[in-house]
Image (spheres, rainbow, N blue to C red):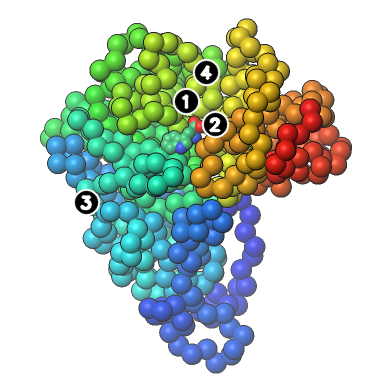
Amino acid sequence: MRRARTAVAAVAVLALAGCTADDDGGPATTPSSTSAPSFAAGAEGAGDPYFPTYGNGGYDVGGYDLKVRYDPAGGELRGTATITATATQALSRFNLDLAHLAASKVTVDGRAATSRADGNELVVTPAAGLADGAAFTVVVEYGGRPQALNNETLGVGGWLRTKDGAFALGQPESASTWFPVNDHPSDKATFSLAITVPDGVQAIGNGVPGARRTVAGWTTWTWRERNPLASYLAFVVIGHYRVKVGTHDGKPMITAIPESLPANGNAARALGRTGEIVDYLATQFGPYPFDASGGVVLDDDRVGYALETQSRPVYGNTFFRGQANATVVAHELAHQWFGDSVSLRRWQDIWLNEGFATYGEWLWQEHQGERTVQESFDRAYASFDWTVPTGDPGVDNLFGDAVYLRGAMTVQALRHAIGDDAFFALLKSWPAEHRDGNVTTEDFIAAAEKASGRDLGDFFEAWLFGDRKPTY
Ligand code: TRP
Ligand code: ZN
C-alpha cells in the first residue's frame, strides 16, 4: 500500500487495457505508434540494495485476505489468498514470493491465469495485460508442507512446526513460507486471517479477533489488522495456549502463554505489564498506533529472540527464565511506533527501528527507577567498536550492536545536540507524520533538522556513518 501515486495517462490505459499479455513481457500486438507504452514483466525483486531478490516490482498490494487450514498431525497447510493490488506499470506478468508451497489455481480478476514456480517465486501471467494504475484482484489457491527459510547470516525465518502446532515468525523474511506475498516492507498492506485448526488448539494472529466457528471438529480463528503491515510483521502461532482476552483503553488486548508454562509465572507476569508499558510509551511517542495489543510467548528452544509482530509481539521464553523482567516488552512495544507503524523503505535503515526500540527500553528503565538514559548511553559509549556504520551496517551486521546500541546512542546524542524541547517534539511528530508509511534515514535527518531549525549534516555523518568515536 502506497500513500500517493502518480496519475495514470488515461489514454494509454484505454488503448492498452484490452491487450493480451504474452510470456516474455512484450506487447501481444505490435503497437502502430512507437510512443505507446508496452506491457512488461514486473521485476522479480523490489530493488532493496541489501536484498535484491526480496519482494517484487510492478504492483502495490492494498490488502491480503487469507483463509488457511493447518493440520498439525500431518504438517499440511492449505490456503486461499485473496490479494488486492494496483499495477504500478503496464504488466504482462508479475511475481509473488512463495517458498516451498505450490499454487494449484490462480485467477486475476476472476479469470484463470497461468502460473509457474521459479525457486521461491510464483510467476503469474494474467489472461490479459494489466494497465498501469489498474486495480486488480489475485486469488491463489495453494498448499503443501511449509518449511522455514534458512539465511546463513541471519538465521531461520518463517514456518516452524512444533509438537502440537506451528508458528510463523522471522525477520527480514518469513511471510512467503505461508502465503503468497510481496515480501518487502516497502509494500505495506492490510491483513486479515481466517485460520482453521483442530478443535482444542488455539491459533493467534495479528490485530483484532473476529468470530470463531467450530464445524466438525475444526475451529476457525479470525484476526484482522486494519492498519497496513510490513509482511515480516505478520505472524501466526498455533498450539495449546492460555489465551487471555481483555481490553486496554477500549481496544482488544490478547495475551497467550503456552500451557507448558505456569499461568502466573515470569512470562505471564512480564506480559501482564503490556498495558502499563503501552501507556508509558504513549506519553513519549504519542498515541498508540493500532486497534489492538497484547503478546504471545513461545516455549521453544529454537526461539532465543522476540519479534515486534504488529500489534502483538512474540517473545521467546528465554527472556523470562528466572526473571519477570519486562525490558524486552518495552523494546517490542516501542517498535509498534518505530518499525511497525512507521516502516522501513529499505533494510539498511534498520537503525530507525532498532535504535529507537532500544532507546524505548532506556526510557522505560529510567521511568522504572532503574538506570537513567544517560547511564545507559555512558555504558555503551565508554567501550564500543565504532568501525561499523549504523546507517549502512551491511547484511552481516543488520542486527548487530552498531544498529541497536550505536543507533540508540545516536538518538541520545541527538537529544543532547538539539535539546529536550525539540527532541521530545520530534519523538512525537515523527510517528504522527509517517503513521502507516515508509521512511528512510534521509527522511529522519530532514525531520530532525526541521524540528531543531539546525543543519545536522555533520552530526549525522559522524554518528551514523563515521568510523571513529564521535564527540558527545
Ligand atoms: N527485531 C527483533 C527485535 O529487535 C530481533 C530479530 C532480529 C529477530 N532478527 C530476528 C526476531 C529474526 C525474530 C526473528 O526485537
Ligand atoms: Zn528490536
First along the sequence among labels 1 and 4: 1
Is the CB–ligand 1 distance for label 1 below 8 Å? no
Residue 402 seen in render: yes
Left or right side of 453 for 71: left
Q: Type of residue at label 2?
A: Gln
Residue 204 in the image, given as x and y percentages of width and height: 33, 30
Q: Secondary structure at mark 4?
A: helix
Residue 336 is marked as: 2
Q: Secondary structure at mark 2?
A: helix
Are circles 1 and 2 on residues that touch, CB within 8 Å? Answer: yes
First along the sequence among labels 4 and 2: 4
Q: CA distance from mark 1 to mark 4?
A: 17 Å
Residue designated by label 1: 293
Residue designated by label 4: 327
Residue 326 in the image, given as x and y percentages of width and height: 49, 15
Q: Secondary structure at mark 1?
A: strand
Residue designated by label 3: 144
Q: Type of residue at label 3?
A: Gly
Nearest the eye: 309 or 436: 309
